[in-house]
Image (cartoon, rainbow, N blue to C red):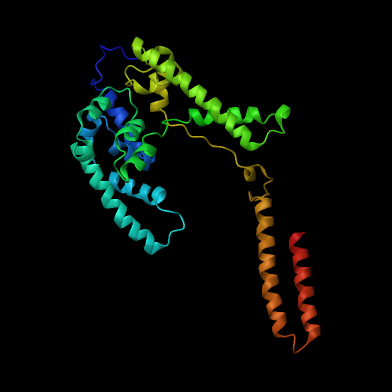
Amino acid sequence: VLDPGDNIDVVDSEGHTLTGRIMLAWKASCADLLHDFARAAFLFSPNPTVQEYVINNHVQADKDAAERLIAKWLIPERTLRTERSRLMASLVPTLWKEWGEFCNHTGGYEKEYMWIAACDGKTPPHLWHSYFSGHTKVLQKLACRVCSKVLGIGSAERSWKKFKGNMSAERSKLSPKKAKMQATIASIHAAENNDQDRAKRMRAGVLWDDEDFATLHLDPHCLPLDCAPDDEVVRRTTRVFRGWIEDWEQEDVGPKGLNKGYLRSMVVLNFWILMGAKYFQSIQIERLSKRKSVTTAMNCFVFWMILMT
């Protein structure tokens, strides 16, 4: 783990700083991580620091993401195309008008105390919008949903674990609906315990400790090559070629170095091609001589037996 006194601007042997390496990793994965939920939550965050950054740095792709969520959530799924376009023409301008008031602290957002609540960090963004965005028609519906999304899959993993435990052999007669309700209650209880532990660590100033970094195994990946462990240096600078043996390489090989299984498959393929050609040819001459048609089919069968032997 880097000490607080370490200089993160030190350039390693490859010409990258620690910050530069983190940004390179981010750029490689940002297309998958920048979901529509994340872009919309970025626009609707009431935190003054985030809001100031949004005003100066938001792009059209962020607004497009919010408009896609309008079409997904606020318009019925079976709405016809013409009616859908008409609803979008009404909802989208309303959203950006309300968002402009939200960013400029005007209209229903001109009260000073609501922004004091946004600064203290005790009110989550989705609860903030539920308290102070009730006068809006579109913004509150979107903001409460995108700002309340969890940042990890821990809650889902705990829910599935509890659901699996509820549907064990001893409780196999439990209905799926009751099992889901019990799993939901258990997940809420676990989330409340995690929030209490996190608040306790924040008050003590120990939100992250050495054990967290040791569990994630991120130290070797974040250090420059001149400071990284030897095995990490070898991993970064060595290109490994894995020549796995395929199944077809283990089959018998003929005297001329040709694979018998491959030759057998090619013979069978050529046989069926020839049989198809002979079949259509026999249909054409069937009117002239039925005996000749039978003779042609027998010749094909004898030829196939010769090839297979």
Q: Is residue 59 visible?
A: no
Q: Quadrant of the N terminus?
A: top left
Residue 199 image position (x, y, % from top left): 38, 16
Q: Is residue 266 left or right of residue 292?
A: left
Residue 283 image position (x, y, % from top left): 71, 82
Q: Is residue 97 left or right of residue 248?
A: left
Residue 163 image position (x, y, % from top left): 61, 31
Q: Residue placed at 71% from the left, 32% from the top?
A: 172
Residue 302 image position (x, y, % from top left): 79, 69
Q: Nearer the viewer, residue 19 or 170?
A: 170
Q: Residue placed at 62% from the left, 32% from the top?
A: 179
Q: Is residue 53 left or right of residue 309?
A: left
Q: Splitting the image into 4 quarters, where does residue 27 fall?
A: top left
Q: Splitting the image into 4 quarters, where does residue 252 fall?
A: top right
Q: Nearer the viewer, residue 73 or 18?
A: 73
Q: Is residue 82 visible?
A: yes
Residue positioned most to the top: 204
Q: Quadrant of the C terminus?
A: bottom right
Q: Residue placed at 29% from the left, 51% from the top?
A: 92
Up the image or down, 289 lies above or below 37; here it is below
Up the image or down, 194 lies above or below 302; here it is above
Give the total of numbered labels.
0
Q: Is residue 171 left or right of residue 29?
A: right
Q: Nearer the viewer, residue 20 or 150?
A: 150
